Image (tube, rainbow, N blue to C red):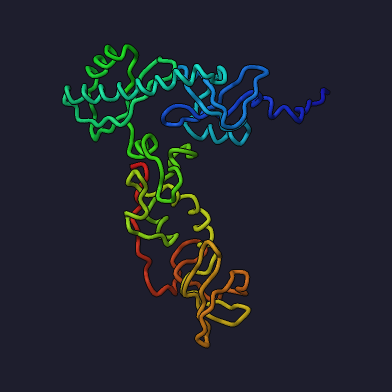
Amino acid sequence: MFEKTQPSPDSSSDQYDRRYVVRYGSLRSLGSFEARRGERFSRGNEVLVRSERGVDWGVVLSPMSQHAAASLRRGRSRNGRILRAVSDEDRQARAGTLTKQKQFFARAAEIIREHSLVMQPVDIELVFGGEKVVLYYLAENRVDFRELVKVMAREFETRVEMRHIGIRDESRLLADYGDCGKPVCCNTHLHETPPVSMKMAKLQKASLDPNKISGRCGRLKCCLRYEYDTYEENRRELPGIGSTVVTKNGNGKVVGQELLARRLMIIFEDGRRQITEMSDIVTVISRGTRSRSGRKSADSPKTEPQTDSRDSQG
């Protein structure tokens, strides 16, 4: 019988050799791009890539890895090739492209008004290689822009693509900084915008004032999703409010929770109130408003109010 050959230790990484994660385009799309043999790039290197749109300006984020490849497969990623590192001539050409984009956008807005189309132009992108112009727009209803595309293609002397976007994509294109003082997440590291609901804000005891928990797009902030899984896991594990517990300092009733810190506010039989670590809980005698499974327990004195989810995708 033949022995089954085992893959070499390096074979798992061979498929990622010469490949890099590159961000490109106005919407900061991510893709797996293959470099020429012998070329190496570092994080932050600016490169010209051949994407599905043509020749694009991109930024190298990292070498490709198994984890990065799995993440890209879950999202809407593309493959392509890295043509070369950008040169000084490329930078000068890009400056001219950005100037031309402003002129194109102003003219596109005029053409839309002339055709009385019910749509709002948000941004315009001239692909670096000149293969096409992409106009990003908002519209509540379907728009017949066939004549518009013909006029724009004739004036701009290139192919025109119309891209209907949502409110969050508008922020991805135009927003700069959030309330935290840092660049908005959708404009930097987010590959996809996660679904966010009021339930997440309530669980984290965030302010329910829409003005304080809404991002630049007017929807719930994406960062409310980041720690939600941890809050939810801790909520399931910690005794609920109203639970009777035995601690190292005596018996008491849970009257408050600090989910992220995994601590409980307990009122003891002698009237003392004390913040107690979860590790100091010896046993739970009776459950309060929620059990470990998330269902309401029989001894819960009140029904928990329901909250309506607000989908971030709008």
Residue 248, placed above or below residue 88: below
User: Residue 20 placed where, x, y %?
Assistant: 59, 27
Q: Residue at x 59, y 82 (%)?
A: 250
User: Residue 75 placed where, x, y %?
Assistant: 49, 34
Q: Nearer the viewer, residue 94 or 160?
A: 94
Residue found at the far bottom of this picture = 270
Q: Nearer the viewer, residue 303 or 311?
A: 311
Q: Residue at x 62, y 29 (%)?
A: 42
User: Residue 58 placed where, x, y %?
Assistant: 50, 25
Q: Which image quarter: residue 245?
A: bottom right
Quadrant location of the C terminus in the rendered image: top left
Q: Nearer the viewer, residue 93 or 266?
A: 93
97 sits to left or right of 8: left
User: Residue 262 placed where, x, y %?
Assistant: 55, 65
206 sits to left or right of 77: left
Q: Nearer the viewer, residue 64 or 249?
A: 64
Picture mark count: 0
260 sits to left or right of 314: right
Q: Residue at x 78, y 26 (%)?
A: 4
Q: Which image quarter: residue 116?
A: top left
Residue 116, placed above or below residue 75: above
Q: Which image quarter: residue 142?
A: top left
Quadrant location of the N terminus in the rendered image: top right
